[in-house]
Amino acid sequence: MASKEVQNTNQVLDSIKPKWISDWVKRTKALYLYPEITVDFLLMIGYPSSDLYAVKLPHNRRGWMGSQLYGGFWSIRVSDGGNGSRVSSFIKEDVGKKYWNYSCYDRRTRRKDRYVQEFDEILFFERIPPENVELIGQWDQGIFRPNDSFIKYVKDEYKEEYMKIFGTNSL
């Protein structure tokens, strides 16, 4: 369930979605997935207590590629002392237009979002079978503890960095 701020932002973004984008693409109805998590991202999201999952999307299902930078980091505060309309206008006039401009149905997003440092997100609109979701680690009081499944999802170029973070010689 999305927070009130995220829902408000998504409603604004959905309201300015260009006509060339299919009706099934609605941020207010989406499950947000991130195709790749870097070491920096893991360190940045060090919540006191949370889980990290790997998800295998069902084959041939529809998803929408977007940019976290333009879509996910802007939110309208519910009680912001009257600045909601100014923030809403900023989303409509600036970041919202960029979000839809740098998003697409296929992998062209990689080429389009060079400006946003590849903070990709996948908006997925269907049920994901439980067997396609795998727990790969947990944050516990600011420390990330990977489980045995974590290594299956680590790219070779990141293994050494992860070993340093976790204080181990092997993953």
Image (spheres, rainbow, N blue to C red):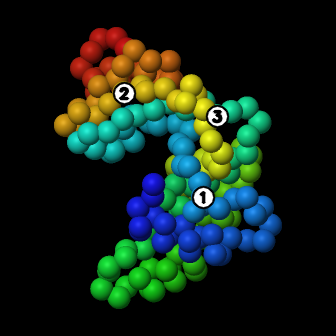
Residue at the extreme top = 170
**The disc label shown at residue 29, or none:** 1
On the image, numbered disc 2 is attached to which residue? 137
CA distance separating discs 3 and 1: 17 Å
In the image, residue 110 above or below residue 53: below
Disc 3 residue crowd, few under 14, some 14–19, many 20+, Cα 10 Å: some
- Quarter holding the C terminus? top left
Q: Secondary structure at mark 3?
A: loop
| Residue 95 seen | no
Looking at the image, how many numbered discs can be counted on the residues?
A: 3
Badge 1 or badge 2: first in the primary sequence: 1
Depth order, front residue of 115/15: 15
Q: Secondary structure at mark 2?
A: strand
Q: Residue at x 65, y 49 (%)?
A: 125
Q: Amino acid type of disc 1? A: Lys
Q: Position of residue 121 (x, y in %)?
A: 56, 48
Query: Which label lies toward us, 3 or 1?
Result: 1
Q: Residue at x 78, y 71 (%)?
A: 19
On the image, numbered disc 3 is attached to which residue? 57
Query: In the shown orientation, is residue 39 left or right of residue 93?
Result: left
Q: Secondary structure at mark 1?
A: helix
Query: Which label lies toward us, 1 or 2?
Result: 1
Is disc 3 in contact with disc 1, using a CB cutoff of under 8 Å?
Answer: no
| Residue 18 seen | yes
CA distance separating discs 2 and 3: 19 Å
Badge 3 or badge 1: first in the primary sequence: 1
Depth order, front residue of 36/31: 31
In the image, residue 63 above or below residue 9: above
Is disc 2 in contact with disc 3, using a CB cutoff of under 8 Å?
Answer: no
Q: Amino acid type of disc 2? A: Gly
Q: Amino acid type of disc 3? A: Leu
